[in-house]
Image: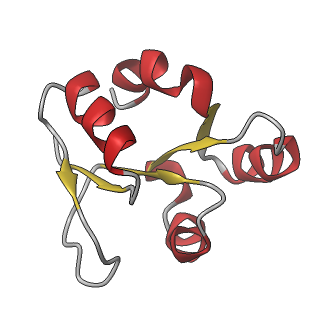
Amino acid sequence: MRIIAFVPDLFFRVKIDAALKGNVRFVSSLENVGDFDFFIAGLEDARAQKFIEKHPRKSVCFYSHVNIEIARRAREMGVKAFPRSSFLEKLSEAVK
């Protein structure tokens, strides 16, 4: 399984990497990412939003618990969206 993640927050990247047991490739650009099965990013990240819109069913995203409207819109598109506070505990199941 090929999982890519666009997560600038280094602290959160470490936690995502641990939750997925190293089975994730972190990217710093969303150009030429190649083939992938799942894409991980924050819904509030403007750089990731267009990419998420192009690949909603492959996107597993997190959001601030106060931003429920962006989560609602993402879920309507087919994105798996979770509050950041529970994202890590749900991540391994979401990428199956």
Q: In what quadrant of the picture does the N terminus appear?
A: top left
> How many marks are shown on the rendered structure?
0
Estimate the x, y position of residue 44 in percent, counting from the top left: 66, 59
Report whether 32 appears left or right of 54.
Answer: left
Q: Name the image quarter holding residue 94.
A: top left
Estimate the x, y position of residue 93 in percent, counting from the top left: 39, 19
Q: Is residue 21 above or below residue 41?
A: above
Estimate the x, y position of residue 2 in percent, counting from the top left: 17, 48
What residue is rendered at 51% in x and 50% in y?
57
Residue projecting furthest to the front? 11
Report whether 92 appears left or right of 42.
Answer: left
What residue is rendered at 64% in x and 47% in y?
78
The colour style of the image is: secondary structure
Q: Is residue 5 above or below residue 50?
A: above
Residue projecting furthest to the left? 22
What residue is rendered at 47% in x and 19% in y?
90
Estimate the x, y position of residue 62 in percent, counting from the top left: 57, 41
The answer to which of 8 and 62 lies nearer the viewer is 8
What residue is rendered at 33% in x and 26% in y?
96
Residue projecting furthest to the bottom? 31
